[in-house]
Amino acid sequence: RGVNDNGTGNGATQRKWREQFLSKLKEVGLLQEQREVRKAKKRIHFILLSAPWSVLCYYAEEINLKVPLEVKPSRAAVTSLLSLPNPLSQNVPNPPLEYYTCQFRTNKLERFLGSSDKETFFKTTQRHQVLYEILARTPYGCVNRGEVGIDRLISEEVFTAAYPLHEMPDNPVSLQSLGLRQILHGYWSKWSCWRRYQPLGHIRAYFGEKIALYFAWIGFYTAWLLPASLVGTLIFLLEHIPPLFVSFVSLQAGLLFDNWGTVFLSLFMSLWAVTFLEYWRRTSSTLTHRWGCSEFEDIEERPRPEFSAMAPMTMRNTITGAEEPYFPENKRLNRTAAGCMIIVIMVNLLIFRAGTIASISASVLNLIIILTLSRIYTSLAGILTRWEMHRTQTKYEDMFILKVFIFQFVNFYSTPVYIAFFKGRFVGYPGMYNTLFGLRNEECGAGGCLIDLAQELLVIMVGKQMINNVHEFISPKVQAWWQRNKMRTPQMAGTQTMMDVSPWEADYELLVCEGLFGEYLEMVLQFGFITIFVAACPLAPLFALMNNWVEIRLDAQKYVKEFRRPVVERAQDIGIWFHILQFISHMAVISNAFLIAFTSSFVPRLYYRYTRDSTLRGFVNFTLATAPLSHNSTCKYRGFRDDNGDYLPEYFHLIAIRLSFVVVFEHVVFFIGRLIDLTVSDIPEEVEIKIKREYYMAKQALAENKRRPGLSAGEQPEETDPSYHFDSLLV
């Protein structure tokens, strides 16, 4: 790990904290080596850190690291028996082996696989976990004031960075000698790999389970978009194109979205969303077991550095017994309530903006405003969440994600919701038009509101995807170029190459990895577009599929080449994002039901077909009413009213039919979804067997009455020299 000090912490207090922190690290047993580099009139001090064998063993047991007991049987033998070539697979060198594992115990060392080789027994990611654990819990001042850990020191500008070191490229003589980073670059991040499976085992081995689960999720989601995009495209071609050749009248164009194909697609996508989440839960449980995280329980979380710095008092932790910074719960509840009020006010402003923008400006302008407000609301959510003073990072992230999602959900979906369910509903009729703030309510076009909704969705969804992809492609490269040139002297900027700088310098010039929040948010909003409003835009899954093929490669390139190596984090699932996806899937069922029943003319045409004329002759006149005689006897408008402006019996018949359709639609979808939930177990039977097998092996390995022949009870293999290769850097 590299911890970097570039001289910003030159105050007496900061120097004292830095010296005390480094002294404490030596007391713990970490090996340190300091290097000084001059960059653009600055002196940067790099402190290389490494943990010897004894320290690794102590903390591996402390944080419950899992180590291998036995190699699991390979699944390749099964696929070879079937002799079915898969065009999406690729032969990636050095596939990581899968093991049965159990928690590390120093006194049972001889029972673990590979324990004889102390250089390779702990994986690189595990060494990083141990080092970060030490850096995070080492005090440098008064513990009661929260003066603990590297994160607080970085926030106080005592150090400028702390990060694990990337593997440096070399010149391998064979594929088997390729490093993990080289493999990920050649077999994952390149654009030529767009149609191949992702090497998830290699991703996990290099970046850890949390990042690997994100790429597993987006890959799984993209694969499931294939059938959705195929169905949507077929329905568009079979049901939507023929009317365009018949007539280009807007009324005829409106029929593009009012047919049995639309109903089928809405039902299909509603079931697709529910089924997708059920099978992802199943896939997630398989992956987390394979990666040794199925029974992962995080240690008691430490307070956030910002919380420690701002908490007004201390209190004894009931779990650890230590004095920790404390913020009164009643004050936090008051702040949370105030934050909720601010959210409600902002949401109301967003809803009002949806109606006014949809009525007075074009969709492109609407998209620009949405993207601008998106950044503002994200900053506001961060301010509110910090103000609420959440103790742990997990709680802080969950509340921040929830706030941002509420803002963005209303920001991106308010205009489509307005067009789908409110536009043209409260217009009134000739001679008695309704107004809001002095403005007459907007009417739908001759083809109905679905054609307006389809246009708005295409502009917002596709436009947002294109802007985001261009930004993700250009922005990291510009930032990296700027950071490299800022760090190097003018004489060196044009001539210095990667071979001229040390690994820790090269990594320091990379961008800081800001986490997966933005990546998840983009995909979750996309998931809403393709499920909630799919009745109006059958091509939405196809556009999402094409975007995700690009998104995976852009994200891969950022993590492999442009970001500093992030600290390894373990995870059981994708966290609160799964619950948000479940919420969206339920909203999609209800939205599609109301969209077909109230926004499209599907139900009125069905009613007319069975009560008047099966050929739909005269249907247009059936949907039009005559303006009151006192106003204009020749004026026709859309509605089910008599000459006096009163509702006809057909209006109430249609209301009853529409509500019945909504109830039947959502009950059918939720019933089928419930059946799928009951029939598809969360954990595959094969995985359950492996879990039981692993539990049995762990029990046997940790049994007190078992020991290897030739060693007396309590005897340990002799200590060897510690490893002096450096894993981490303080800058």
Image (cartoon, rainbow, N blue to C red):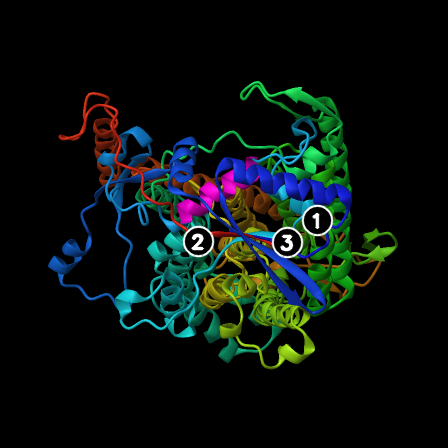
Q: Please, what secondary structure does the residue beneath circle 2 have?
A: helix
C-alpha separation, residue under disc 3 versus residue under disc 1: 40 Å
* Disc 1 packing (10 Å; few <14; some 14–19; many ≥20): some
Residue appearing at x 70%, y 69% in the figure? 40
C-alpha separation, residue under disc 1 versus residue under disc 2: 26 Å
User: Could you tell me if the residues under marks 2 and 3 are in contact, i.e. CB atoms within 8 Å?
Assistant: no
The part of the image, by quadrant, that contains residue 455 is bottom right
Residue, disc 1: 157
Q: Which mark is residue 413?
A: 3
Pick the front one: 437 or 154: 154
**Residue 530 in sight:** yes
Q: Nearer the viewer, mark 2 or mark 3?
A: 2
Q: Which mark is residue 191?
A: none
Left or right of 478 in this view: 551? left
| Percent x, y of residue 187 | 36, 68
Residue appearing at x 54%, y 57% in the figure? 526
Of helix, strand and loop, which mostly describes the magenta segment? helix
| Percent x, y of residue 93 | 28, 64
Of mark 1 and mark 2, the one earlier in the sequence is: 1
Residue, disc 2: 207
Q: Which residues are magenta?
A: 125-137
* Disc 3 packing (10 Å; few <14; some 14–19; many ≥20): many
Q: Amino acid at mark 2?
A: Phe
Left or right of 266 in this view: 658? right
* Disc 2 packing (10 Å; few <14; some 14–19; many ≥20): many
The part of the image, by quadrant, that contains residue 486 is bottom right
Q: Nearer the viewer, mark 1 or mark 2?
A: 1
Question: Outermost residue, left direction?
Answer: 81
Left or right of 535 in this view: 282? left
Q: In which quadrant of the rendered image does the C terminus lie? A: bottom right
Of mark 2 and mark 3, the one earlier in the sequence is: 2
